[in-house]
């Protein structure tokens, strides 16, 4: 590992953040250097600080500690992500024999120099008590490889030399802060502190020194590990990997059945589903197929704060059985064993304490699956990704640790304390569950305005949406709009031709590989051709039937095996049209194809009820473009249709608005709201049709 510090870049930060103290601008710079390296910190892990003299409103100078705020990531932290804290009152806290966590948080908050600042890191007091101007704290993988060993102290001394202080694992917060300063005062020659099973603190009187000490010690650790590994091979990586197609098809079945297995009803009776992130890089696959894979799953977390994301143990699955029923049995048993083990662990540890704890869900978060790779679960996609990243790093670190010695995790007593520590749980944020959270929706014809409206509303309700369309270009446009609104983790795209069952199946496989499965299906793709029967070409008629009728059939049909494997019900909301009840002349292919799709959807309602899958229909009318997304259907047929009614094309939107009872313009978001209404299962309804047309008596469902 090499220092990336460049004076030129440092000056650029000072220039960029002219309105904050220079020391803080530089603190941002070296924090970014640390945050950019996943070997040093992952997902908001680690923290940094600087002490600066700042004038208060009366012009009085006082020492202020700027320390990373909770919820910020070192990789992209801004000056405002550092919480300014009055140093002198915080330092006095050291006199206390003990300080409860909640009171510590309170003390940190009341000493903030800005009322609006975020909560400072739980490790803020370590930064406050140590005297150095700059302090850098990381959870570097290679340091943990050295510390997660039975004879960690010896190894760390041998690897990092004698200017490093070594502390046992101590709960972060007040106890760790006290231990750190007590140690430092007796051993003020040290340049760094290694906290066993936790990480590294380095310090210095300038940003470069403190940062480069981190790099220096991590580099020493890496070199030490490299040298040792040559002497002992722990893992026998698999040489032959399965073909990619096989990996994906196994992962897809595994994901779908697993999602069903771990879905559970919460105290409010809502079904909680997980999203899944699979990692099948060649390295991970080689590990998953190695002889040592079970052993790698028999040991616990790399560092205790991973436990809230990954739980302590991964589950090892040797291989994915070839039939669904065998796979179901296997997962049924493995998850059952895991849950029982977790419940025992909870009982054992909760009963030792005076306070009572609300038990967290007992489900595993990480699976290592032979021939599939690493499978990680989370309540949101972001959580699933974080979990997968932590699990990947942990696996690699365990292999290194086993190669230089024996990997050893912390005892469960400490892990329990961490898992149920209020300050740790707070990191997950207040988990207000959105009604569709954890669900995956697929919307076909998503490259048009209605697709955008539906996807937008589904995401607002908490679902992750896979946008499907035959046109990659149109998908990209809608994707961009949604990513700008909600961020990239809520949207996936898949190019799919609904006319082909194979193409739809392939699309669903991609979605299930990437997200875990499918819960909501919205067949929305449609085309239209204007023309009286007399003039309508058979080929044009058939083209419309292929998309509007066969397409809906395929989209529903391909979803059934997915629903069956998951076993958690689901919702199909078919975008039909008011034309089914009130057809129009010169619109025969469209109306007939949609009427057919309507009927097949009702049949699906009859057939899929046994799987608790509901099928409902929406009948919108006259929905035009939305912002920059044009309606291709209207572009193609609007003019001809208006002409056939003796009207000019320019008046089209007004014409349709005036036509309905409520005199309203119907928007794609209205359709989206109706999809959400059905998907959230607020009424026990299936086989129903809901008009979204402003009221058209001729099209009242009957
Ligand atoms: Zn830490």
Image: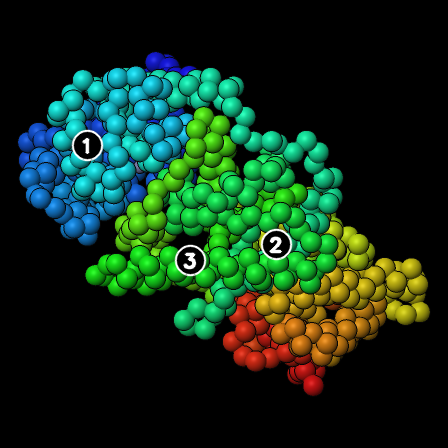
Residue 255's disc is 2
Toward the top, the furthest residue is 7
**568 left or right of 470?**
left
Mark 1 vs 3, N-terminal side? 1
Q: Residue 214 at x, y = what percent? A: 33, 22
The secondary element bearing badge 1 is classed as helix
Specify the quadrant of the image occupied by residue 95: top left
**218 left or right of 108?**
right
- Residue 518 appears anywhere in the view: no
Q: Determine which residue is flagged by label 3.
A: 342
Which residue corresponds to the image point at 77% horizontal and 62% vertical from the top-left? 554
Specify the quadrant of the image occupied by residue 124: top left
Mark 2 vs 3, N-terminal side? 2
- Residue 200 appears anywhere in the view: yes
Q: Residues within 10 Å of mark 3 (few under 14, many from 20)?
A: many
Q: Residues within 10 Å of mark 2 (few under 14, many from 20)?
A: many
């Amino acid at each position: 590992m090499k220092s990336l510090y460049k004076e030129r870049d440092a000056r650029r930060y000072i220039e960029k953040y002219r309105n904050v103290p220079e020391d803080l601008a530089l603190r941002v710079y070296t924090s970014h250097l640390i945050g950019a390296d996943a070997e040093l910190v992952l997902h908001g892990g680690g923290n940094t600080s600087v002490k600066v003299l700042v004038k208060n409103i009366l012009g009085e100078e006082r020492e202020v500690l700027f320390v990373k705020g909770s919820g910020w990531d070192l990789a992209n932290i801004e000056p405002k992500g550092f919480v300014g804290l009055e140093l002198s009152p915080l330092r006095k806290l050291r006199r206390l024999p003990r300080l409860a966590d909640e009171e510590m948080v309170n003390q940190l908050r009341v000493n903030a120099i800005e009322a609006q600042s975020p909560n400072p890191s739980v490790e803020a007091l370590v930064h406050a008590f140590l005297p150095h101007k700059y302090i850098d704290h990381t959870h570097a993988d290679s340091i943990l490889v050295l510390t997660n060993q039975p004879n960690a102290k010896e190894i760390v001394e041998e690897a990092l030399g004698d200017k490093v202080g070594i502390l046992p694992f101590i709960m972060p917060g007040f106890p760790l802060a006290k231990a750190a300063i007590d140690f430092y005062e007796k051993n003020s020659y040290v340049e760094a502190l290694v906290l066993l099973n936790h990480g590294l603190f380095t310090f210095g009187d300038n940003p470069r020194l403190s940062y480069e000490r981190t790099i220096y010690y991590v580099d020493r650790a890496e070199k030490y590990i490299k040298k040792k590994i040559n002497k002992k091979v722990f893992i026998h990586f698999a040489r032959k990997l399965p073909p990619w197609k096989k990996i994906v098809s196994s992962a897809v079945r595994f994901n779908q059945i697993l999602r069903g297995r771990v879905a559970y009803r919460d105290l409010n009776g809502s079904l909680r589903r997980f999203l899944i992130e699979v990692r099948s890089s060649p390295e991970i696959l080689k590990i998953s197929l190695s002889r040592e894979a079970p052993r790698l799953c028999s040991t616990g977390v790399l560092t205790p704060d991973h436990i809230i994301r990954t739980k302590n143990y991964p589950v090892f699955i040797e291989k994915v059985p070839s039939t669904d029923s065998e796979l179901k049995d296997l997962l049924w048993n493995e998850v059952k064993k895991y849950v029982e083990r977790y419940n025992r662990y909870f009982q054992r540890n909760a009963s030792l304490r005076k306070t009572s704890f609300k038990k967290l869900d007992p489900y595993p978060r990480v699976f290592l699956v032979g021939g599939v790779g690493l499978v990680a679960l989370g309540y949101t996609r972001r959580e699933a990704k974080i979990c997968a990243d932590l699990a990947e790093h942990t696996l690699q670190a365990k292999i290194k640790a086993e190669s230089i010695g024996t990997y050893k995790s912390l005892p469960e007593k400490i892990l329990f304390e961490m898992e149920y520590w209020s300050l740790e749980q707070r990191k997950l944020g207040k988990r207000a569950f959105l009604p569709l959270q954890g669900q995956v929706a697929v919307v076909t014809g998503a490259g048009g305005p209605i697709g955008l409206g539906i996807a937008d509303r589904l995401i607002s309700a908490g679902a992750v949406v896979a946008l499907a369309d035959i046109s990659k270009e149109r998908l990209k446009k809608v994707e961009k709009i949604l990513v700008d609104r909600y961020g990239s983790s809520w949207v996936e795209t898949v190019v799919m031709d609904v006319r082909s069952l194979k193409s739809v199946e392939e699309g669903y496989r991609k979605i299930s590989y990437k997200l875990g499965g499918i819960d909501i299906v919205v067949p929305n793709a449609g085309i239209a051709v204007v023309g009286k029967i007399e003039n309508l070409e058979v080929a044009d008629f058939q083209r419309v039937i292929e998309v509007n009728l066969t397409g809906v059939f395929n989209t529903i049909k391909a979803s059934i095996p997915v629903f069956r494997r998951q076993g958690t019900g689901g919702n199909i909301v078919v975008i039909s049209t008011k034309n089914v009840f009130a057809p129009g002349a010169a619109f025969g292919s469209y109306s007939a194809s949609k009427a057919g799709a309507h009927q097949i959807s009702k049949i699906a309602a009859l057939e899929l009820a046994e799987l608790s899958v509901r099928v409902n229909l929406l009948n919108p009318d006259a929905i035009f473009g939305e912002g920059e997304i044009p309606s291709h259907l209207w572009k193609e047929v609007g003019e001809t249709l208006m002409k056939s009614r003796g009207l000019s094309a320019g008046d089209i939107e007004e014409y349709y608005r005036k036509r309905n009872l409520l005199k309203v313009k119907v928007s794609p978001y209205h359709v989206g709201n109706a999809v959400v209404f059905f998907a959230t299962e607020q009424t026990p309804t299936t086989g129903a049709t809901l008009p979204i047309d402003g009221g058209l008596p001729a099209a009242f469902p009957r």
